[in-house]
Image: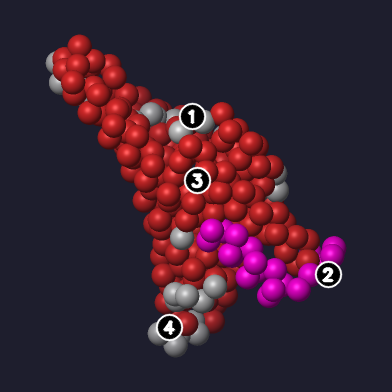
Amino acid sequence: MSTHGSIVRDIIKFNSYTSSRDKIYRICQYASRLVLWYMARQGKTAGDLQEWFQKLEAAMTTSRKLFRLATSLEFLQKAVDASKVTDNALVVTILGGMLGKALWLLIDHLLWLGKVNLVQVDMKKWSRRASWFWLVGQIFLVARDVRKLQLLMIRAKKIQRHGEENRESTGTLRKDFHTARLEAAKDILDILIPLSSLEFISKGFGAGGGLLSSFIGFRLEWEKNVRPYTTKVKV
């Protein structure tokens, strides 16, 4: 019973965060896109089932757009905060990544206003522009992830020189490596989404990449808000 209660409490805690709920919606969104792409590829028009997935995908997409209404401002704030970072390479990559994603979301807000007929928008033209900003932002973020891993490797070498007297630092370093690797994998997979929107790759690759990155994002969010990643350091 205690284990069951603990799991329920964890789920309730996870679901209390807007960013966590967004991860669940994102999984459903890209899973639906992948299924719809597969059906179209196989030439299947399974009436009710296909319509159900289309409605699910549309509902998840709309919900996530509402969740993200202020996220563009968060990205802009992170771009401003990048100036406080001491490593020049990180400053450039964070700035490029956050500005790219902020512009993508600002255009995404405009497209949403166009869909609900509040403003007149050339949907095709602005959708492509949004995808380009997203793609550029993701490329910068992958470069940021690579730089983070490089800096962690430098830290690891410094800790090795001090040997046994830095057990706590070693544990922290392993956690940082774990998070940095997951973030790098997520950002690389997310590149597939704008690439598919710009028709450089198939919609299936974009949906598949989005689904996998969503699972990674779910894990990162779970470890951030519910159960932090733990590592055992040998004594």
- How packed mark 4 is, by other alpha carbons closer than 10 Å (few <14, some 14-19, many 20 or more), is few
The answer, for residue 205, to whether it is visible in the render is yes
The C terminus sits in image quarter: top left
SS for callout 2: loop
Identify the residue position indicated by label 3 in the image: 93
Number of the front mark, 2 or 1: 1
Q: What element carries label 3?
A: helix
Specify the segment rendered in magenta.
116-136
Q: What residue is pinned by disc 4?
A: 41
**In the rendered image, which quarter is residue 163 located in?**
top left
To which residue does mark 2 refer? 120
Q: How far apart are marks 3 and 4 (CA)?
A: 37 Å
| Image location of residue 4, percent across then percent down | 37, 32
The image position of residue 45, as x and y in percent, is: 50, 85
In the rendered structure, the answer to whether residue 188 lies left or right of residue 30 reads left
Closest to the camera, between mark 3 and mark 4, is: 3
Q: In which quarter of the image is residue 114?
A: bottom right
* Residue 71 among those drawn in magenta: no
| Front position among marks 2 and 3 | 3
Q: Which of 38 and 118 is in front in this view?
A: 118
Pointer 2 or 1: first along the chain: 1
Toward the bottom, the furthest residue is: 43
Residue at which label 1 appears: 86
Identify the mark nearer the N-term, 3 or 4.
Answer: 4
Between the C-alphas of marks 4 and 2, the distance is 33 Å
Find the distance from the CA under tag 2 to the CA under tag 1: 44 Å
Q: Is residue 21 visible?
A: no
Task: Relative to 140, say whether 234 is above or below.
Answer: above
Q: Residues under labels 2 and 3: Cα distance?
A: 34 Å
Instruction: Identify the secondary structure beneath mark 1.
Output: loop
Give the quarter of the image for residue 39.
bottom left
